[in-house]
Image (cartoon, rainbow, N blue to C red):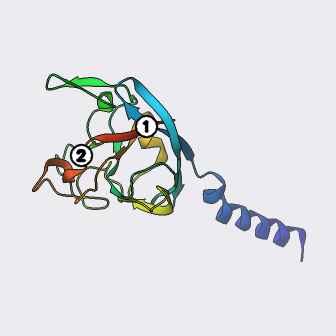
């Protein structure tokens, strides 16, 4: 091979691998949400940009067995705050991330809140380890927001209960 051909092959390899080399990543440590603020750690979640969205790797423990709502919330705070006259853990995180102001809770890739993520399922030991993917989301747009695990599951509807019936806020972390 000539020098020009070798340089061309090398340049092509660099171009093909560039998106992988520059993928943005954010790791979030989640803590139990309490009326005093952040409680004990329950593990971490890593977001990584992929070609058409983000890959989400969960390594969580200490969860109640079963399904849990899992969402990106608007604000970078996990502090308790008053809502309807009652102090609520992690209420300062605000509502679900919804930059298009759809006002709809339709689940991941459903065209509603962009903060709707796939449900977490904790096993009998309280672990939720896995990999999931969400389209049309980037790490840069979710930085400086909060990540929330709710006590209950999520049916991705506002009926029969508002916001899918996920109940209270179990754990929270700031995406940096």
Identify the secondary structure beneath mark 1. strand
Outermost residue on the front side: it is: 124
Whole-percent x, y for residue 120 in the image? 39, 58
Outermost residue, right side? 2
At horizontal 31% and vertical 61% (from top left) the residue drawn is 109
Q: Please, what secondary structure does the residue beneath circle 2 have?
A: loop
- Residue 92, picture quadrant: top left
Please, is residue 109 above or below residue 78 in the view?
Answer: below
Indicate left or right for 83 with 171 as reference: left
Snapshot quadrant of residue 19: bottom right
> Does residue 1 appear to the left or right of 48 in the view shown?
right
- Extreme-bottom residue of the structure: 1
Q: Residue at x 20, y 43 (%)?
A: 101
Q: Which residue is mark 2?
A: 167
How far apart, in angstroms, are the residues tagged by discs 2 and 1?
15 Å
User: Which is nearer the N-term, disc 2 or disc 1?
Assistant: 1
Which of 155/62 is in front?
Answer: 62
Is residue 170 visible to the viewer in this orientation of the structure? yes
Q: How many marks?
A: 2
- State whether residue 52 appears in this view: no
Q: Nearer the viewer, residue 44 or 13?
A: 44
In the depicted structure, whether residue 53 falls above or below residue 140: below
Vertically, is 108 above or below 169? below
The residue sitting at 55% across, 44% down in the picture is 26
Q: Which residue is mark 1?
A: 32
């Amino acid at each position: 091979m000539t020098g020009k051909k070798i340089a061309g092959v090398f340049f092509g390899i660099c171009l093909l691998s560039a998106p992988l080399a520059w993928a943005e990543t954010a790791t979030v440590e989640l803590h139990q949400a309490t009326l005093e603020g952040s409680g004990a750690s329950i593990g971490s979640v890593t977001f990584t940009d992929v070609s058409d969205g983000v890959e989400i790797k969960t390594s969580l423990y200490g969860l109640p067995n079963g399904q849990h709502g899992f969402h990106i919330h608007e604000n970078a705070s996990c502090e308790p705050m008053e809502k309807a006259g009652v102090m609520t853990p992690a209420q300062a995180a605000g509502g679900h991330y919804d930059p298009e102001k759809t006002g709809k809770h339709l689940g991941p890739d459903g065209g509603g809140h962009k903060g709707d993520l796939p449900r977490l399922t904790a096993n009998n030991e309280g672990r939720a380890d896995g990999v999931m993917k969400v389209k049309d989301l980037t790490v840069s747009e979710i930085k400086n927001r909060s990540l929330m695990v709710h006590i209950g599951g999520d049916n991705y509807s506002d009926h029969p209960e508002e916001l899918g019936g996920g109940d209270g806020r179990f754990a929270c972390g700031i995406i940096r």
